[in-house]
Image: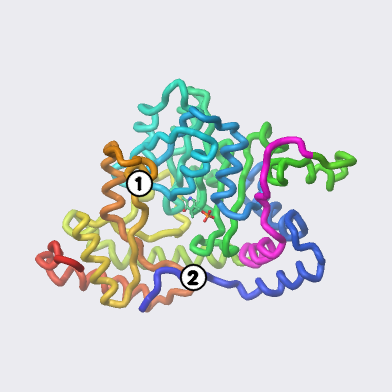
Amino acid sequence: MIGFNKPYFSGKELQYIQEAIRLEKLSGNGEFTQRCQSFFEQRYGFKKTLLTQSCTAALEMAAILLDIKPGDEVIMPSYTFVSTANAFVLRGAKIVFADSNENEPNISVAHVAQLISAKTRAIVVVHYAGVACDMDAIMALAKKNNLFVVEDAAQAIDSFYRNKSLGSIGHVAAFSFHETKNIISGEGGMLVINDEQFVKRAEIIWEKGTNRSAFFRGEVDKYNWVDVGSSFLPSEITAAFLWAQLEQLDFIQQRRKQHWQQYWDGLKEMANAKFFQLPVIPEYATNNAHIFYLSTTSSVAQRVLLYCLKHAGVQAIFHYLPLHQSPFFTQGSAPAKLPNAERFAETLIRLPLFVELTHSDIAQACAAVKTCFDLKHAELQPAGNP
Ligand SMILES: *Cc1c(COP(=O)(O)O)cnc(C)c1O
């Protein structure tokens, strides 16, 4: 069986964790945290970064930082992970879900424009599969309406929009180092602050509402409770692990991109209206090879292909159930229609993608896709209970 994901280890993780132990500083914001943060700031031009325990935590920090209050409206795509929405719901915000684009799962800017009201405070974009949303259009819309922009860049490490790194464009951004992402630390994440006005307060929220970071820099002589906050920072054990990954970032990215390209080359001849579409990468976006997906022609085709691939020894999986249709959001009432988000939920399939895949694994996965379709379209019929 070719599994869907396998975490990559650079081999230096334990060595750096041992070093953290030797330094006898295991709580947060130590040597390894600083090293990781500097790396990201220098490499991607982020104004300020703070490692967090997850991308979820970074999004929660973003919602506090933007001072989102009960009744505020926050616009975001329905086709995303629950944390994008939960972080703002926890502040009492009303979530307004926008549809995806027709040809790719990212948020439709035209739809966002229609959803802006006097109560809208922020737009949250999600760079699905690490492929950029149309950030010039989003930033222009936000500026015109005096809104904040949060980038949920959970999947978007080392990816770019017109030469700007993703995560460097919105007022704030959140990354994930969850085991399933390109760069990992088990659980882990990072808040990026690009707007100077938020830098100081972000550090305070990060450190339980205290000015402890300023204290350790010698800027104040005692540290005190000065704002709301929580314990958002990860331990040095996590940061040490992450550092071992960052040293191999170029290798990881090079491998993933090779694999992604092999899928593309292997499947492009079948990418047509009868079988499936391949991912669309707009001209303004780069591909960081976080996900390789196909969009099938119907929910039945999705179901049958998943089943067929499983039998061929390839673990493929669908992705998000749209949040606008979720039990928590609808509370039993009929959901609005967001046709593109619903279609991606019903038709999208992700194929295995991880560093240690071999050329022959991917060849086998591509062959399995072909065989599944070659079994004749006749077989891609509702199959009782696949
Ligand atoms: C993975 C992911 C998250 C959550 O990341 P965690 O680090 O697990 O909290 C949030 N948003 C998106 C779009 C994701 O893909």
Q: Examine the image and state in which quarter residue 271 appears.
A: bottom left
Magenta stretch, residue numbers: 225-246
Camera-near label (1 vs 2) is 1
Task: Assess whether residue 240 is covered by the magenta stretch.
Answer: yes
Residue 168 is situated, as x and y percent measured from the top left of the image, at: 58, 42
Quarter occupied by the N terminus: bottom left
| Three-letter code for the amino acid on which mark 1 is drawn | Ser
Q: Which mark is residue 355?
A: 2
In the displayed orientation, state which residue is furthest to the top.
118
The residue sitting at 45% across, 28% down in the picture is: 141
Q: Is residue 77 magenta?
A: no
Q: Position of residue 160 (x, y in %)?
A: 51, 48
Q: Is residue 136 above or below residue 314?
A: above
Residue at (74, 54) in percent of width and height? 29
Please provide percent x and percent y for residue 183. Answer: 56, 62
Is disc 2 placed on a helix, strand or loop?
loop
Residue 301 visible from this viewpoint? yes
Residue with the mark numbered 1:
326
Note whether 79 is above or below 297 in the view shown: above
Above or below — where is 224 with respect to 315? above
Q: Give the quadrant of the C terminus.
A: bottom left
Question: Dot 1, crowdedness within 10 Å: few (<14), some or many (≥20)?
Answer: some
197 and 121: which is toward the camera = 121
In the rendered view, tell whether residue 40 sits above or below residue 47: below
Please identify the residue farthest to the front as the structure is shown: 332
Of the pair 119 and 18, the residue shown nearer to us: 119
User: Looking at mark 1, is its residue's CB closer than 8 Å to ligand 1?
Assistant: no
Residue for point 47% across, 38% down: 135
Q: Are marks 1 and 2 in contact (CB under 8 Å)?
A: no
Element type where label 1 sits in the image? loop
Q: Earlier in the sequence, mark 1 or mark 2?
A: 1
CA separation, marks 1 and 2? Answer: 33 Å
